[in-house]
Image: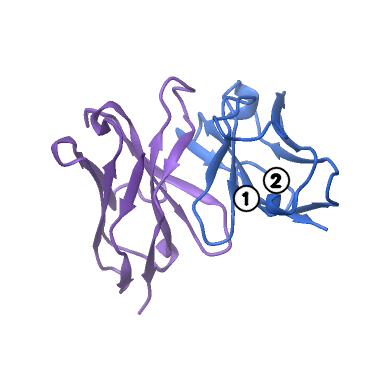
Chain colours: A purple, B blue
Amino acid sequence: QVQLVESVGGLVKPGGSLRLSCAASGFTFSDYYMSWIRQAPGKGPEWISKISSSTSYTNYADSVKGRFTISRDNAKNSLYLQMNSLRVEDTAVYYCARDMRGVAAAGPPKDYWGQGTLVTVSS
Amino acid sequence: QSVLTQPPSVSGAPGQRVTISCTGSSSNIGADYDVHWYQQLPGTAPKLLIYGNINRPSGVPDRFSGSKSGTSASLAITGLQAEDEADYYCQSYDSSLIGSVFGGGTKLTVL
């Protein structure tokens, strides 16, 4: 069965950095685009980044562009999110999610999600 | 302020039918980008409910259905059950933002 497991988040001071990872299993990881999505407390989900199956293409929401970097290691079935220059408003639960194949090349649905990991940015 | 607008809450009695709207604009739903719907139970990750406007993943009951017209989409739930009480979110793509966008969510209460 498909499983996505994010690493533990944590408490970070404003301006600090944190790297999240997501371990994938139960499917051929290298065949799928992957995304990071976050959800601030009491808010709707916010898509923040996606990466192509071969890593040749990445895209970011304006809110994180220039501060966050998405990457993947297909040999390790792992997805990563390097977060730098963290701000209080980055506080959220961060989810890794699999982009469904064959549906809506632009804005595909996310057919599997990890359990999420809480990142708190506070002094 | 979410790019896609949903009513904050809807409610219905068991067995009834409810609909949840998702209103966008000419750069997302109105540009004919697909709409997808998710159900989020408290403390859990969102679960895909409807994809490509009208399609249900395997395992999703046919009580859930989706539609789209113009700059809006709707999720309908018939035969309401207590376990349907959750938050529901729509998702599409926005060509101005060059990325996926979500609605602010609708909390469904089963009376």
Tell me which residue sits at (13%, 36%) in the image: A75
Does A84 sit left or right of A108 as displayed?
A: left
Q: The residue tagged with tag 2: helix, strand or loop?
A: loop
CB contact under 8 Å: marks 2 and 1: yes
Mark toward the start of the polypeptide (2 vs 1) = 2
Q: Which residue is mark 1?
A: B104
How much space separates mark 2 and mark 1, taking CA atoms?
Answer: 6 Å
Quadrant in which residue A88 is drawn? bottom left
Does B6 sit left or right of A9 as displayed?
A: right
Q: Which residue is mark 2?
A: B6
What is the chain identity of the residue bearing mark 2? B
Which of the two residues, A76 or A40, is positioned nearer the viewer here?
Answer: A76
Q: How many marks?
A: 2
- Asked if residue B78 can be seen in this view, the reply is yes
Tell me which residue sits at (41%, 54%) in the image: A115
**What number is the disc on residue A17?**
none
- Asked if residue B71 can be seen in this view, the reply is no
Quadrant in which residue B52 is drawn? top right
Disc 1 marks a residue whose amino acid type is Gly
